[in-house]
Image (spheres, rainbow, N blue to C red):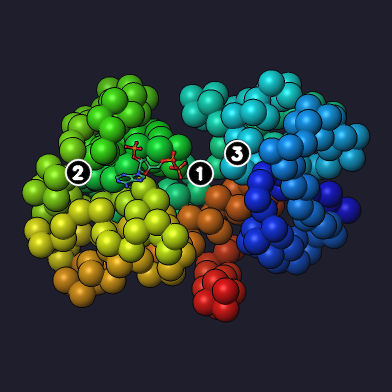
Amino acid sequence: MYKLGLIGYPIQHSLSPWIHERLLQKAELQGEYRLFEITPEDDFKEKVLELKEKQLDGFNVTVPYKEKIIPYLNDMDDIAKEMQAVNTVVNEKGRWVGYNTDGIGYVRSLENAYPDLFEHLNRKIMILGAGGAARGIYYALTKFGFAQIDIANRTQEKAEDIAKLGKDNTKTKIFTIEEASRHLDEYDLIIQTTSIGMKSVDLKPIVQLNRLNPETIMSDIVYQPLKTQILQDAERLGARILLGHTMLLYQAQYAFEIWTGMCPDVQEMEYELLAVLEGR
Ligand code: ATR
């Protein structure tokens, strides 16, 4: 009987229970995935100690606790150490070990949708944004060995900071958002990681797409709306697209694998999750 869960705030509308209960079913494992909301008024330390007593097999950590959880861990994997952010904790005989599944989750979703992209490593990739998600994605892609991964962000220092994670075989240039718009046609893959495009933020795409090459894959990690304006526009211009909810599924798949050792296929869940999101 697996005891799993999520800490964060607010989490009442989280899709994680839905996803992990399906993963348990697919893996034919008994278990439950519960929400443990910790509000800003709560004493975080007290809540975490209460959680420890529940002896969960594993749990996810979301905003705003991905960094705050770190002092309570016994160990972290190398990726989580580099990110200094943890979204998955596994209980290894009472020791809490932290992971960050964002980057690998994204790469898995990309590989599943566009395996041809991975046939050659001399690809040119542009990441729009330099927040936590961009950091994880950049790191996972550099580890894969792609030749050029450029970053465009409103705040240049944050992009420069991410570029320090780069490996010798990956070149990285830093751009402003305006520069990125002018160079869009040079890329095989463009990954939109900012909050622009979200229902609650700003629906207008972050970059101008008039220079988009139809050979380019346009990916957005925003999934509400399901097909953001930048993806709609890119599709209209003939480009291939990757919807944001797929990253959600594959990072959950990787977390589930860390907890249970099993890696259920999530491809057919993509459509089910779309239907769930459409109903919101
Ligand atoms: P996440 O963890 O989801 O990546 P984050 O760390 O808050 O979220 O990062 C948000 C990203 O969206 C950042 O790249 C941010 O740009 P800055 O680094 O300049 O803050 C970007 N972003 C948010 N609102 C933006 C806006 N109005 N214009 C341009 N970029 C914006």
Location of residue 157 with respect to 6 vertically, above or below = above
Dot 2 falls on a residue whose secondary structure is helix
Question: Farthest front residue?
Answer: 41
**Left/right of residue 15 with respect to residue 102 in the rendered view:** right
Q: Position of residue 105 (x, y in %)?
A: 50, 49
Q: Looking at this view, is 102 or 227 the one in front?
A: 227
Horizontal side of 188 relative to 137 (left or right) equals left
Cα distance in 3D space between marks 3 and 2: 27 Å
Considering the image in quadrants, where does the C terminus appear?
Answer: bottom right
The residue positioned 78% from the left and 64% from the top of the image is 28
Task: Assess disc 3: are there few (<14), some (14-19) or many (≥20) residues with their C-alpha within 10 Å of its C-alpha.
Answer: some
Q: Quadrant of residue 200?
A: bottom left
| Kind of residue at badge 2 | Ile
Looking at the picture, does residue 181 appear above or below residue 203? above
Q: Position of residue 211 (x, y in %)?
A: 9, 58
Q: Which mark is residue 102?
A: 1
How far apart are labels 2 and 1 at the CA level? 23 Å
Can you identify the residue that label 3 sits on?
64
Foreground tag (3 vs 1): 3
